[in-house]
Image: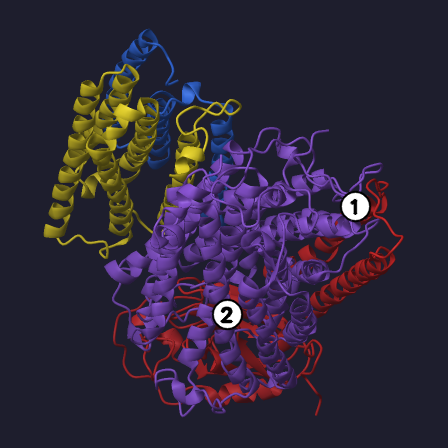
Amino acid sequence: MSTSLIHYISKPHPVTGITNAKLGTWCFLASEVMLFGALFSSYILLRVGAPSWPHGSELLNVPLATLNTMVLITSSVTMVMSWASLAMKNFSKYRLYMGLTILLGIAFLVVKTFEYGHKFQHHHFPSTDTFYAIYFTLTGLHGLHVIGGILLNTYFLFPGSALWKTEPEQFTGRIECAGLYWHFVDLVWIFLFPTLYLL
Amino acid sequence: MEKYYGFGLPVDISTHGAEIDRLIYVIHIFMAVLFMGWLAFLVLTLVKFRARPGHEARHHVEHFKAPTYLEVFVALFEVVLLVGFAFPAFHKTRDVFPNRADALEVRIVAEQFAWNVHYPGADGIFGKTDPKLMGAANPVGLDLGDPLAKDDVTTINQFHVPVNQPVIARLSSKDVIHSFGIPVMRVKQDVVPGQTISSWFEAKKTGNFEIACAQLCGLGHYRMRGFFIVDSEADFKTWLDQMAPKPPAPPATAATTPQGAAA
Amino acid sequence: MQHGSQEEIQKQVRIYIAVFVALAALTVITVAISYLKLPLIPAVSVALFIATLKGSLVALFFMHLISEKQIIFSVLALTFVFFLFLLILPVLS
Amino acid sequence: MSHGEHSRELPFWRKYIFSLDHKVIGAQYAVTGLLFLLFGFCLMMLMRWQLAYPGQPLPWLGGLFNEQSMVGGIMLPEFYNQLGAMHGTIMVFLGVVPLAVGGFGNFVVPLQIGAPDMAFPKLNMMSYWVYFIGGVVMFASFFVPAGAAQSGWTSYAPLSDIASFGQTMWLFGMVFLITSSLLGSVNFIVTIVQLRAQGLTFFRLPFFVWAQFVTAFLLLLAFPPLEAAAVLQLMDRLAGTSFFLPTGLVVSGKLLEVSGGGNPLLWQHLFWFLAHPEVYVLILPAMGIVAEIIACNTRKPLYGYKSMVYSVIFIGFMSFVVWAHHMFLTGMGTKMSAFFQVTTMIISIPSIIILTALLLSLWGGSIRFNTPMLFATAFLPMFGIGGLTGLPLGLAAADIHLHDTYYVIGHFHYVVAPGTLFALFAGVYHWFPKVTGRKMSEVLGKIHFWLSFPLINGIFMPMFIMGLAGVSRRLYDPTQYAHAQPTQPLNVVISICAWLLGLAQIPFIINFFGSLFFGKKVGQNPWQATTLEWSAPSPPPHGNFETVPVVYRAPYEYSVPGEKEDFIPQTERK
């Protein structure tokens, strides 16, 4: 494998102090900031230009979304705990926390599905008005990110964790990067929640 | 007949166009001088420093002062262009509108692929319009029940204006983005659906010119051509009278409130 | 960060729990405030302030930004500037 | 350290198709990019027939098209618009960027920084294949009912919102291309930051690496807003939302059944937020290539290397705050337009600094006029014309007359065609020996250059005259307008030059493929150059270098007084 020739995969670079994967993940997150930033910016533009704009809490289910916020925050904690367990060389605890993170991610999606289903039942679709259009687009794109995170974490829970036996340091680094992504998804939700539901 | 179009800029019959043309000329002279200087230096260098027996490259080359001066000069010249030419000319066309009382106000409604022109008629006030009423017979969706609409004149692709009188055009689009361009008037303004954008101009000469759509608007973009006719004051009045609706309008279809032309 | 000793990580874990409690509390607060039905400007300011606070907690502690290396801050600073440029966009229309 | 034996064990499909080696991926990108450039060029040659001889049947080829495109060999306006939109899209996103960034960047950057490969080889492979899928989607869109996208490469809404299915394909294709660019840019940034050889400080980097570094940041941060815009437009087209559709649209006499409330200008803002940095994505790698070739063939260091580096960083930064100069005529306020006019004028200054530095680099040299140098030298005045003609367009008042005319077409083609493309040709001739171990034919190369150079000017110079006469771009039949008739003979001149330019590429194609097998074999450093890629064997083996390179010097140590040779490689101890 050509990867064996490349430096700073598991050990940090002596000058920058970080591994390749970590810098790469942060660069990727930077692009994600611009993606969601552009959508937030579009949201502001459309809202400012609209003659009237509904208050999110009148149309959306705030208690359910609050529950979902809690679920996502908790999953962020379990995610960071799974990394901490690896850093403390406790692999079984890692599996426990990682499994919990995945379950919480799925729980988030299930709640989201109920929310969407409820909207569709009442004939509220993306085409209904600009508010629903931006609501479905933003939460849908965020949902896709959650699905991506669940797939990634599942990979690291099962087949990907074989690396722990051969390259524990590299594996811990990978989990830290997966965590960065997962926390970012949480962070986006932290801004989406008040923007769409509370304002 | 005077030649309007050729290889250079089209003839300019507007009151404001001279400033735009002056800017275009000044900047092109500047560009030509700068480019010729560069090119002369390039050719000279390529000949002087070509590889040949007995000629060696120099590792250390003295620091040149000239490029710094040149760059400072270019920067200053750009400031002059902006402050001296570009800002005032753009400001004049976009911000300093003529007095509405002295001007002819028209609505231009663009569609795929025609220019609908809506004159307010004798009362000087536009009748109410509604997208729901738009159709082949009523291209701007004029509400015929509105008393203010009774004297309104609409044409398709025939834009008559009087000479020596400012014209304020309220530009809107029914479907996609078009761009309202009259080359001889040095007027070009994107027409964005959902918005009404105003543009003004004043013709100095009479004649028969054309409106061109400058923004890709679909498969008929190339033939979205309108006629822009500058009449003498008397001719314009005659034309407008001729176009004015003769028979009394049918009874009102809906209760309406009079609505003036929104600024 | 990942090379910290066991004790350091144990200390980290306690911080994570504290951050979690803070995040949960802030969520409750922001929802509670929304029921007050403040006028738009104060409501937006308060909600965005709390969201920024929560976001900073996540970024600083969960994402370890508090002890991160210079290069990552450089990337993020650049991104932040361009993010601000993006926000010029609504002003333009 | 030699891993040559290891790679030989790989089966063919792992070595050449799904390869993880940056050199193979670079070559894949370059060849695919060149093929798309040829395809995009062919689209343009078809358009040129309609423009030169509107309404006349296309000889010989006319019968090959179905009745959706041509009737009796006469092109339909729908097909013309498809050709226009796809020519732009293909040239920019499938041709130039993949060749300049994916091809040259992938092949040359790791070699020039002394790295064994890119930081993430698997990501690199994915980036190529995602790009490939994007290309296939774009290409396939010609064959769907009602054909490919036809709303211009800019895809302005609402026209694109109500366009036929080809537009949906275009959007999906763009999502793939954007994703590919994002993956690539992450890889470039990490590689350049982390994997530089020992001793290779940032100010010892070849200028080409700097250009690629800044380009990677532009791709990373400018593309996501377009991705957001593409998502919004897909929602408009597939889920019936109205992000770009205002209330009360009447299309073909019928009120559109949508909720409305959207804003058409939102698309333009998001699009140009990407597309202006994208212009610099096209030009910066080209500047980098030209700088390398000029330093090597003048046998002296670049003039003002540091000021060039600072300029390129400044350009990258400023390119994010000029986007609205594409939108002066959308009804923007004078204050805002003043802001963007000022930023536009500011960004011209670093471009002039780089151009002047490259020009002054020739002074005092001993210039070898080989094929790469001819193309690189021609880049300078051509980019000069392209840059200067941007000035009138950057001033809102002059833009009133010139906006959306052929002047704009002439301007950006001078930047991208005789500018960037010439630099890319120069790069192909320059690095071909490194990629293959063989040199391309100088005779064919010079024929290629001396035919292409006048012809390409014959295409784009007349466009300025047409633009000043006020002729709009994207016109299927310009003779419909009285003001476009006097300049119509120029359209014939342009078209003939374009077709001849097509023929002038034949020597290049023969040279490219012929030299793969029959080119003169060369050693590792045929141009006596100093940068690291020339310290590796030609072609470089898997892992690139036979010994791990250590750098002791600045990138362009040519003609140092008192030295035996007129070049000192970066790896040579002081």
Picture residue at 56% right of the left edge, 74% below the top: D472
> Which chain: blue?
C
Q: CA distance from mark 1 to mark 2?
A: 41 Å
Q: Position of residue B258 (x, y in %)?
A: 37, 67
Question: The numbered mark 1 sits on a residue in which chain?
Answer: B
Q: Position of residue D295 (x, y in %)?
A: 72, 48
Q: Position of residue A19 (x, y in %)?
A: 43, 28
Q: Nearer the viewer, residue D459 or D153?
A: D459
Evaluate whether label 1 is on the same chain as label 2.
no
> Which chain: purple?
D
Judge from the rendering whether residue B122 lies leftward or rightward of residue B103; answer left or right.
left
Instruction: Please name the amino acid that badge 2 sits on.
Output: Leu
Question: The numbered mark 2 sits on a residue in which chain?
Answer: D
Q: Position of residue B105 (x, y in %)?
A: 52, 71
Element type where label 1 sits in the image? helix
Q: Nearer the viewer, residue C89 or D197?
A: D197
Give the residue at mark 1.
B72
What's the colour of chain B in the image? red
What's the colour of chain A in the image? yellow
The answer to which image quadrant residue D239 occupies is bottom left
Give the residue at mark 2.
D38
Q: How many marks?
A: 2
Q: How would you rate the neighbour count of disc 2 (Cα within 10 Å): few for under 14, some for 14-19, many for 20 or more?
A: some
Picture residue at 59% right of the left edge, 34% below the top: D549
